[in-house]
Image (spheres, helix red, strand yellow):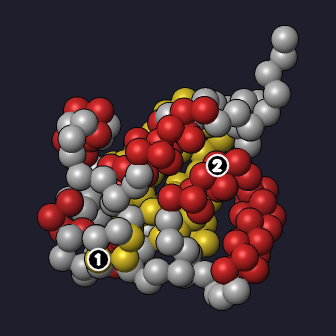
Amino acid sequence: MKQIYLAGGCFWGTEHLFKLIEGVVDTQVGYANGHTDNPTYKDVCTDTTGYAETVRVAYDEAVVDLATLLDMYFMAIDPLSVNKQGEDEGTQYRTGIYYVDAADVPVIDAKMQAVAQQCGATLAVEVQPLKVFYSAEDYHQDYLDKNPDGYCHLSQGLFELARRLKSKPQPQ
């Protein structure tokens, strides 16, 4: 399985979105690329730990490729917004793509360039190797499955698109 770590504002909706995509085999919400050990949600919300709310997306690249996942990611975020997505503000809500496989960089760079060209501006999405990731507390995992009426900054239409998404032709 391949992995990519995506920070797209509140991790509840971002995780729910990616869980719906065929070929995504596992997700986990957590905190990425900060500078303290074992942060808690309360710590991260102080805006002093350097962490971003992030979703680890494990996927089967025979079913869904990274470019398709990044297409969905860019539909879910405002790539020009600094430290804010939806109503959530703070450095923990910044956008970022954190990779574990350097072979993914050309795909990420190409997508970043295409989106920047569409926007006509420099993107506020950081692209970095994953330095550290800590799993969030259990109550954050699968939050919208456990709390269907819970807060989410993403639209139901985007969730429907994710459910229908097919990126690679399936063998007959």
Q: Residue at x 40, y 55 (%)?
A: 154
Across and down, in percent, residue 37 comes to 29, 65
Q: Nearer the viewer, residue 35 or 75?
A: 75
Identity of the amino acid at label 1?
Answer: Glu
Q: Residues within 10 Å of mark 1 (few under 14, many from 20)?
A: some
Q: Residue furthest top?
A: 172
Q: Secondary structure at mark 1?
A: strand
Q: Secondary structure at mark 2?
A: helix
When asked about the image quadrant of residue 16, the answer is top left
* Apparent side of residue 10 relative to residue 101 in the rendered image (left or right): left
When asked about the image quadrant of residue 141, the answer is top left
| Residue 101, label in figure | none
Tell me whether the residue at label 2 lies in contact with that at label 1, contact meaning CB atoms closer than 8 angstroms: no
Q: Where is mark 2, residue-wise?
A: 69
Q: Residue at x 42, y 74 (%)?
A: 94
Q: Nearer the viewer, residue 36 or 136?
A: 136
Q: Residue at x 29, y 77 (%)?
A: 89
**Which comes before the other along the chain, label 2 or label 1?**
2
Across and down, in percent, residue 28 comes to 40, 42
Inspect this view and state whether residue 130 appears: no
Q: Where is mark 1, residue-wise?
A: 89
Q: Nearer the viewer, residue 160 or 100?
A: 160
* Apparent side of residue 78 relative to residue 53 in the rendered image (left or right): right
Inspect this view and state whether residue 5 appears: yes
* Apparent side of residue 13 relative to residue 18 in the rendered image (left or right): left
- Position of 148 relative to 122 (above/below): above
Q: Quadrant of the C terminus?
A: top right
Across and down, in percent, residue 55 comes to 44, 51
Identity of the amino acid at label 2?
Answer: Leu
When asked about the image quadrant of residue 116, the answer is bottom right
Distance, label 2 to label 1, CA atoms, is 24 Å
- Position of 113 relative to 4 (above/below): below
